[in-house]
Structure formats: structure tokens, C-alpha cells
Image (cartoon, rainbow, N blue to C red):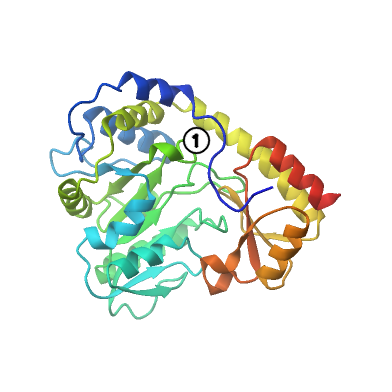
Amino acid sequence: MDLSIGTPVDDTPAVLTEALAAAGDAPGYPTALGTAELRTAAAGWLRRRLGVEVADPLGAGGPSLIPTVGSKELVALLPTLLGLRTGTVVIPEVAYPTYEVGAVLAGLAVRRTDVPPPDAAGVVLVWLNSPGNPHGRVLSDDQLREWVTWGRAHGVPVVADECYVTLGWDVEPRSLLHPEIAGADHAGLLAVHSLSKQSTAAGYRAGLLSGDPGLVRPVWEVRRHLGLLVPGPVQAAMAAALDDDAHVDAQRERYRARRETLAAAVRGAGLRIDHSEAGLYLWATRDEDCWATIEWLAGLGVVAAPGSFYGPAGSTHVRLALTATDERIAAAAERLTG
């Protein structure tokens, strides 16, 4: 039972596949800015699902949102696209590896911390991830506001990777761009979203960047010259998906049921689950080196991801993904408790 990789396994909903097929006649180049239909749908989704109001989604006053080729390429390229050439990128203590990859690619240093550093010297970008991968940690409103205040005080852009924002279980995640966090505008702030998990569309490479037009614009301008364009049929599928809540809610319930089954088995096997209040993973530990836990799980036929992949602070945990079929989740639960 391979629970090590968080790739969706359920069918992509018809609302996406039908829109993709209908837009299949696409002889011209797609727009880097995104079609008007997509930007309108994205603005509506942000408002409806996250309580976020973006400035002028159609871009007359400068783009406040653009589509991206999934979220991973945006995470990896954002420091480069923003023209950052020297300095330090702040990333979470336990973090998705691509934040560090993107900093290294741009020739920047990396600093791991979960709280605003007292010394901002040299910091040029901050990455937040809430709900977090791998641990499912959700930042509180106060924690988010603290980062907003810090970033604006020091002139450092703060970017939130919110790809799991619709998958809150024990708490309701809040967007960095929500008015109760950001205030009256999105100055100095960006948020990254994805359809990979909520719409079971990882193969479509469909993501969004939104927030401060002063930060979105240079990213858009460089992307269009690099040819980082979301294909036209995918943009049509994105617009259809973002206008439809039913498929998102149905997939969420599938993940909820799998989470309940796997979490009960993990605890029954004597592991402790930390954080994991949102997202698609269980962050579990036996309070030992993660590789010892990996070996023990492998003996049961269960494959997990070692926590050390996500930074030194994860060295005693393993990550178990909920992105497996009902049958595989049930089989893993039986192995863990049998």
C-alpha cells in the first residue's frame, strides 16, 4: 500500500473533462493573463469559498490574478520571476522541498523558521504554507496577521501556498488574502492555489496566483516571455471547475472517509498523529528516527514518506497520504491493526 506520494487517484470530474474536450479546437496560442472567463470564475471562487475579494480581476488596472502551470512550477520559479538575485528566502521549519529548490535555483540562501525573525536583514521573500504539507498544520489568524505586519514593516513579500485550503478537517483554514488578515488591500501579499487536489486534476497542471497587483504583474510579464502558458483547453476546464462547488464537496467527503479509516488504524497501531488538522496527510510518529518507522511500516507492506525529506525538524515523523483508493486505504488499515 503506497501512501508515500500525494497524487490523486480518483477520476477527474466530468465538469472538467467535458469542458476540456469542448475547448479542444485550440489553434492559437493561449494567453498568459488567462481568459476573461477563467479570471472571472477564479475571482468568484475566491470570493465564494475563501471570502477574498481581488482587485479588478479582469486586469484593467494591472492583473491581480493569473493562471499558472500547476502550483509547483510557480513555487519553484517565483524568486526568479520576481527578479530576486541576492538575499534569503524564509521557509517553514518543516516544508515542501520545492520552496528550498526555488531559492537555490535563484542563487538565494534559505532560512527555516515558523515565526517572524527579529532580524530581517537580507530577507527578500517569505513562504507560508497553510494548511501545511507534510504536517497539515493550519496557521491561526493571529499567526497570519503577525506575518503580514512583519512583511509590510520590512518591505518583504509574504506568499502563502494554500493548495489545501478547501480541505480543513478539525479547523477551517483562512486565506492570507482574507480581509480579516490582509486588511483593506493585498499590499505585499500573494496566495497560490491549485485544482490538483480539490478537483482531482493534478494531470491538468492548473494553478492560480493572486494578490498584490504590484507583485502579480512582474510575474505575469516574465511568464509570457518565457512561454509559461496554461493551455487554452485547460483554462476552459479551470473556469468550469471554479464555477462548480459540487464536485469539490463530493471529493472532500471521499477524503474525509479515508482519513477517518486511516487515522483510527494509525492510532490503533500505537502511533501519535501530530497536527494533521487539514490537508491530505497524517503526520505520524513513534518518537523514533523516521527511518526506523519507515522500516517497520515496510514490514507491514505500507510505504510512507520519511519526515526528514521535509527538513531536520521532521526527522521523527512519517507522512501518510490519504490519496489512495478506498480499497488501498482499507488494506493499509487492516495491516496496521491486524
| Residue 108 coordinates in the image, percent (x, y) | 30, 73
Whole-percent x, y for residue 263 in the image: 72, 49
Amino acid, disc 1:
Thr
How many labels were placed on the picture?
1
Residue in the image at 24% along x and 46% along y: 228
Question: Can the viewer see residue 292?
Answer: yes
Q: Is residue 224 left or right of residue 338?
A: left
In percent of width and height, residue 223 lies at 20, 49
Toward the right, the furthest residue is 338
The one nearer the camera, 108 or 301, is: 301
Question: In the image, 285: left or right of 226?
Answer: right
**Residue visible at 27% across and 78% down in the picture:** 122
Answer whether residue 285 is visible to the viewer in this image. Answer: no
Q: Closer to the camera, 96 or 143?
A: 96
Q: Secondary structure beneath disc 1? A: loop
| Left or right side of 33 for 207 | right
Asked which quadrant contains residue 329, the reply is top right
Q: Position of residue 42 (x, y in %)?
A: 33, 35
Vertical side of 117 occupied by 323: above or below: above
Q: Is residue 11 above or below residue 97?
A: above
Give residue 87's quadrant in the image. Answer: bottom left
Q: Which residue is mark 1?
A: 200
Residue 53 position (above or below residue 24):
below
Which residue corresponds to the image point at 19% horizontal and 35% vertical from the top-left? 58
